[in-house]
Image: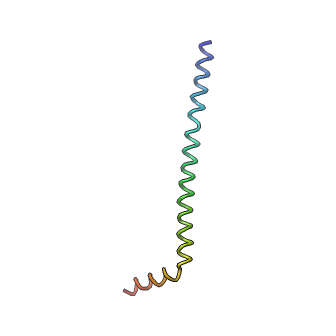
Amino acid sequence: MIQNKTEMITVKSTETSFPPVSLQYSISLLFFHMIYLTFFFFVLLSFSFHADFLSMIVALTLE
């Protein structure tokens, strides 16, 4: 009876130890996706204002 209880406790502890790992993985994945999306957004922004950026770079290099 006591052994059964300890087995149940160990199973519960392993069950509770699993979610944080997947949570950490999903958080890191979300973080990576946020970085990727912001990078993509900046690339899109630079393409939409391509002429402005080019003229600014040219002006900076000429100065």
Residue 33 is situated, as x and y percent measured from the top left of the image, at 57, 57
Residue positioned 53% across, 78% down in the render: 49
Q: How many numbered dots are placed on residues in this image?
A: 0
Q: Residue placed farthest to the top in the image? A: 1
Say which residue appears at 60% left-offset and 17% top-offset. Answer: 5
Residue under the point 54% across and 73% down:
45
Quadrant location of the N terminus in the rendered image: top right
Give the x, y percent position of residue 40: 56, 67
Residue 12 sits above or below residue 56 on the image? above
The picture quadrant where one finds residue 61 is bottom left
Asked which quadrant contains residue 4, the reply is top right
Q: Quadrant of the C terminus?
A: bottom left
Residue 39 at x, y percent in the picture: 53, 65
Q: Is residue 25 above or below residue 40?
A: above
Q: Residue furthest bottom?
A: 62
Position above or below: 30 against 45: above
Position of residue 18 measured from the top left corner of the image (x, y, whole percent): 59, 36
Q: Residue furthest left?
A: 63
Q: By what rule are the colours in the image chosen? A: rainbow
